[in-house]
Amino acid sequence: MKKSLKMGFHKNVVPQVFKGKITTWRLRNHRFKKGDLVAFENSQTGKIFGFGKIARSFKTTVGKIDLQDKSHYKTYENRQELIKAFKRHNPKYKVNKNTPVFSYTYEFKKRAGKTIKYNKLIRDRIPEIIKEAGWKPTVKTLNKKEFLSALKKKAIEEANELDRAKNKKDIINEMSDIQELLDVLAEEIKATRTEIKKFQNTKRKKRGGFKKRLFLIKEER
């Protein structure tokens, strides 16, 4: 079973998260990737105060961090001030401008006294992951008609995510989500790969493919 994902925040930083902090810089590689649901824990009390959905993660160094990055909430006047902050929260680490840093940007949802509504199709393990993050999910099993409709809507949602993907890794990630949905949709309507390939070939012969990178501006009479 996949281990639940969790990230600790110092008690003095927790209020910043509630006030709009959406980026955290870490000296330890948590290996979070885009789309991961992560429980946010108060490091001093051990209590889960919310969870975040990772929107972006990348590796950099202390010397390359933007000191005025407002998504981090706390900004810095100079590099030495940032290094002191890292040392204060990570006393066991030797920190200089070349020290590796792992940056995580997230969408935060607080736990206490709030219901978050989604009303959308989810992957099979999401309820389990939500429970591990300290939340109580409410789910239902769709009938065939509802499921087919939800699959198509989910495919549109993932296509929009693909449109926003900027690099190869993110593009492949969104492609894999779309492929997963198409595979399930094909299974639900009992469409074989041979049938799908036949439709592809017919369209390709009649209308062509996309290899020429053509972009239609307009047509006139």
Image (cartoon, grey):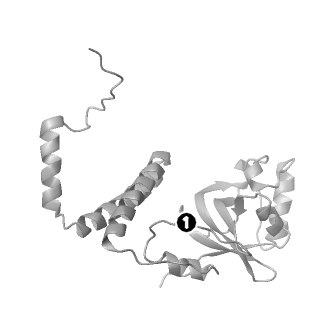
Residue 137 screen position, x and y as percent = 56, 78
Quarter of the view holding residue 44: bottom right
Residue 130 visible from this viewpoint:
yes
Q: Residue at coordinates 60% horizontally, 81% vertically from top-left?
A: 136
Q: Classify mark 1: helix, strand or loop.
A: loop
Depth check: give the residue in front, 122 or 75: 122
Depth check: give the residue in front, 194 or 117: 117
Depth check: give the residue in front, 170 or 218: 218
Relative placement, left or right, of 87 versus 5 is right
Relative placement, left or right, of 48 versus 141 is right
Residue 214 screen position, x and y as percent = 30, 29
Q: Residue at coordinates 59% horizontally, 67% vertically from top-left?
A: 117
Relative placement, left or right, of 101 versus 36 is right
Q: Is residue 61 above or below residue 38?
A: above
Residue 166 visible from this viewpoint:
no
Q: Mark 1 points at which residue?
A: 118
Q: Residue at coordinates 30% horizontally, 20% vertically from top-left?
A: 219
Residue 215 screen position, x and y as percent = 33, 29
Relative placement, left or right, of 105 versus 221 is right
